[in-house]
Amino acid sequence: MKEEKVHKIVRDGYSKIAKQQPNCGCGCGCATNVSQQVGYTKTELDAVPEGADLNLGCGNPTALASLREGETVIDLGAGGGLDCFLAAKKVGEKGRVIGVDMTPEMLDRARTNLQKSKYKNVEFRLGEIENLPVADNTADVVISNCVINLSPNKQRVFEEAFRVLKPKGRMVISDMVLLREIPKGIQENVAAYIGCISGAEKKSRYLKHIKQAGFTDITVIEETAMPVEALVTEETTAQILKELKMTREKAVELLGAAVSLKLSAVKP
């Protein structure tokens, strides 16, 4: 799909998600406890404003980033602001957190959540992660949670992350990647794209993008399977079965090609 079409699909899909009630799920069929399943503690989730947790993640990058007081953090694809608020607590009043999202409705939700919070060190900016509205050498840390797979130009995303990081800055992300190719029918399924399946790339290609962007010390922290029900709804599964004329067991097997990858990398 062309970049413009992908961006429209993602904006439309996440615009609908942003308008849902707090904790009603990601529109991909996930249950309300998915955030805990992928690594957030109940204490963390209870500490953020209601409506910040949309069950959109596939990991907890703030728990892996070893954030320090006074650091500047940029979150690629901030959503309702969950990771931004958790990061804000860790970097303290002298630190700074910038959340970037390209969906106006999601940005509105994040800013509303910010108004309900106590944090003065967080801001949300409208922008695409392929063209970050952030100056060069701004961040100590770039984080992202299950968002880069939605981009049609992942190489550009990592180049932008590299650009906005300070020298010796680090990138810590959780994202969906493929262990093997999936059928074209699933690749072109809009619901599966919103569910973080269709846009995912092969793990080897994904890591190559990061290296080509200039990062070093690329470390895979963890690689885990995601429950299929956390990625796509029964309705989406039924649609895939109908379009590809396959059994449910085969569809689940194919969707199982996508895994959650947690990794870190450093800008020299």
Image (cartoon, grey):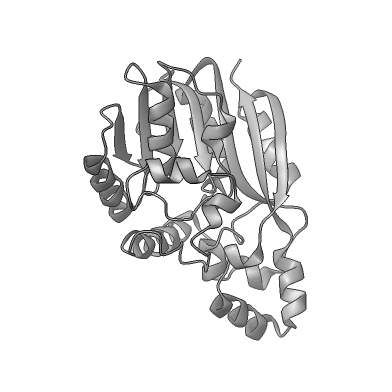
User: The C terminus appears in which quarter of the rendering?
Assistant: top right
Q: Name which residue lies at 57% across and 71% down.
A: 189
Q: 29 above or below 2?
A: below
Name the residue furthest left. 115
Q: Position of residue 10 (x, y in %)?
A: 44, 59
Q: Position of residue 136 (x, y in %)?
A: 41, 21
Q: Name the one closer to the observer, 172 or 117.
A: 117
Q: Name the one closer to the observer, 223 or 126.
A: 223
Q: Name which residue lies at 71% across and 49% down.
A: 224
Tell me, yes or no, if residue 143 can be seen here. yes
Q: Name which residue lies at 60% across and 49% down.
A: 38
How many marks the image carries: the answer is: 0
Tell me, yes or no, if residue 129 can be seen here. no
Q: 239 above or below 201?
A: below
Q: Position of residue 255 (x, y in %)?
A: 69, 66
Q: Quadrant of residue 90?
A: top left
Q: Name the one closer to the observer, 66 or 152.
A: 66
Q: Position of residue 1 (x, y in %)?
A: 54, 62
Q: Name the one closer to the observer, 26 or 166.
A: 26
Q: 185 above or below 44?
A: below
